[in-house]
Image (cartoon, rainbow, N blue to C red):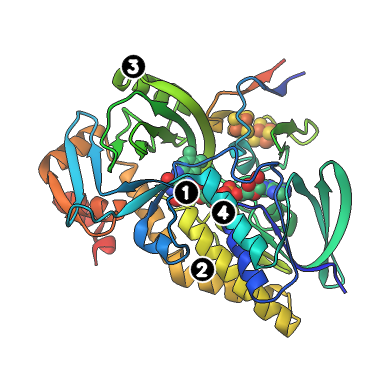
Amino acid sequence: MKRLAVNRYKCGYCGACIAVCKFNANELVETYLEIYEDKCTLCMACVKTCPMNALEVVE
Amino acid sequence: MTDYDVIVVGAGPGGSMAAKTCAEKGLDVLLIEKRQEIGVPVRCAEGVGRKEFEEFVEPDEKWIASEIENAELYSPSGHRVKLSADQAGNEVGYVLERKIFDRHLAMLAGRAGAEVLTKTSAVSMERENGSVRLGIRSMGEFQELTTKIVIGADGVESRVAKWAGIDTTLRLNEIESCVQYLMTDIDFDPTTTYFWVGRKYAPGGYIWLFPKGDNSANVGIGVMPSMADKPAKYYLDRFVRENFPDGEIVEVVIGGVPVKGAIDTAVADNVMLVGDAARHTDPITGGGIINAMKAGYKAGITASEAVEKGDYSESFLKRYDRRWMDDFGQTLIRNRKLQEKMLKLDDSTFDRLFKGIGDMPIGEMSVKRLALELFKKEPKLLWDLREFLL
Ligand SMILES: Cc1cc2nc3c(=O)[nH]c(=O)nc-3n(C[C@H](O)[C@H](O)[C@H](O)COP(=O)(O)OP(=O)(O)OC[C@H]3O[C@@H](n4cnc5c(N)ncnc54)[C@H](O)[C@@H]3O)c2cc1C
Ligand code: SF4
Ligand code: SF4
């Protein structure tokens, strides 16, 4: 199944991806980005926004 | 009885100003910050206009990294426009050291009487009998607190907005995706800020260099995800390779800047949003420190009036909306429109405009003013922009 993966070595925990998510599918817990797979629609908004290219849809 | 009159979520410039103002008005206020160190990691290029900034705080050399007198802007083919203060020594802006500045503001709030908790996140919010039950996780321990008002100063990733039902989601043409390097061993004038514009450099945004003292500078980029086909870091790395190949990177800053313009409302029952949470950043410059401080102050004043009246309803809190709208809200609306026009300009138009204008004096650093000057040189654009020039 496809899902959104965070590359934690690239992520700079900036919160930009949260500001563009319409589905409340992510949250920044201090420096840890949580993705809620049950809510994520793989709309790609956060993937396109991430300054560090830390988000990716994987199989 | 509630535990607090006001809980402020987020200790950036907006939240600290709000908590300080509430405390000065005699309210019981708690300021919570999810990070363990206030101000770190920084998400900012740290530039502010001098005049407006000084309305809020007495500048202190401990957190002023540079004093700025000039700005240089470069078009895609390298035509330069230089803006200079009327007289030398007449600085128009500061570059802050936000790690220290943000902490200073939080301490001002604390000294005014606010309680401050770090490593403490707001994790849930529910309204109940006219007040709010806010769930917090403080140093790992969950706890519920009651309060009359919540001020959401929780930045670009605001959850308070979502809990309160205020839709502030940014579309891909309403955010700048940013990366910045603190660089050393590069050449620049320490009293000048530099900007590179055009799609070649930064699709839908710009590249900046802001000096931090004599030996290092913030070199950063913002790009608009709807226009850029690569991540922000790609464009910045290319620029740095071409322009500062021998520079050293001693810090990386990452962030998103809202450029949505004014939202319809920043209030709901028991809740006010300030600063980045309310998308108060300027759509053209991306500057948000001063607006966040202004909004924090206004939300604090409104909270004290609400507590005095015992009315925390959306309709009472609307006066906060009017206050920020009357102050900088109109500029947000106008600059959003201006930005939409600027985004349509191609690189050759920027080159032509820059070539035509040369150098000019500035009173107060204003990118908007420059934009207007540029368009005056180009009658066709002038017609398109007539509403902004009146
Ligand atoms: C790369 C970049 C460059 C910039 N350059 C400039 C510039 O040169 N000049 C300028 O004026 N502005 C600039 N800005 C914008 C500026 O940084 C922001 O507008 C400003 O910080 C907004 O202040 P704030 O108080 O609203 O939010 P922030 O400063 O973002 O503070 C929000 C705080 O809330 C905390 N928080 C979030 N969620 C929770 C929670 N659930 N519980 C507890 N705490 C929480 C966060 O940890 C954070 O500390 C830049 C931004 C970026 C990203
Ligand atoms: S936008 Fe990218 S760098 Fe920023 S928090 Fe999200 S995944 Fe991490
Ligand atoms: S892919 Fe879309 S739904 Fe999923 S987290 Fe990113 S923005 Fe949210």
Q: Is residue B224 visible?
A: yes
Checking the image for residue B104, the label placed there is 4
**Residue sitting at 32 percent across and 21 percent down?**
B244
> x, y percentage for residue B75?
23, 34
Dot 2 alpha-carbon crowd within 10 angstroms: few under 14, some 14 to 19, many 20 or more: many
The alpha-carbon separation of the residues under discs 4 and 1 comes to 10 Å
Sequence-wise first label, 4 or 1:
1
Image location of residue B163, percent across then percent down: 75, 54
Q: Are marks 4 and 1 in contact (CB under 8 Å)?
A: yes
The numbered mark at residue B245 is 3
In this rendering, which labeled residue sits more in front, label 4 or label 1?
1
Image quadrant for the N terminus of chain B? Answer: bottom right
The residues bearing labels 2 and 4 have C-alpha atoms spaced at a distance of 24 Å
Is residue B174 shown to the viewer in this render?
A: no
Is residue B334 shown left or right of residue B8? left
Q: Nearer the viewer, mark 2 or mark 1?
A: 1
Q: Splitting the image into four quadrants, where does ligand 2 fall?
A: top right
Q: Which residue is mark 1?
A: B62
Residue B371 vs B254, above or below: the answer is below
From mark 2 to mark 1, how far is it between C-alphas?
A: 30 Å
Q: Tag 1 or tag 2, which sits nearer the N-term? A: 1
Name the residue type under label 4.
His
Image-based side of B222 in relation to B29, left or right: left
Residue at 17% from the left image edge and 34% from the top image edge: B79
Residue B170, above or below B87: above
Q: Are marks 3 and 4 on the same chain?
A: yes
Judged by depth in the image, the label closer to the viewer, 3 or 2, is: 3
Quadrant in which the C terminus of chain B appears: bottom left
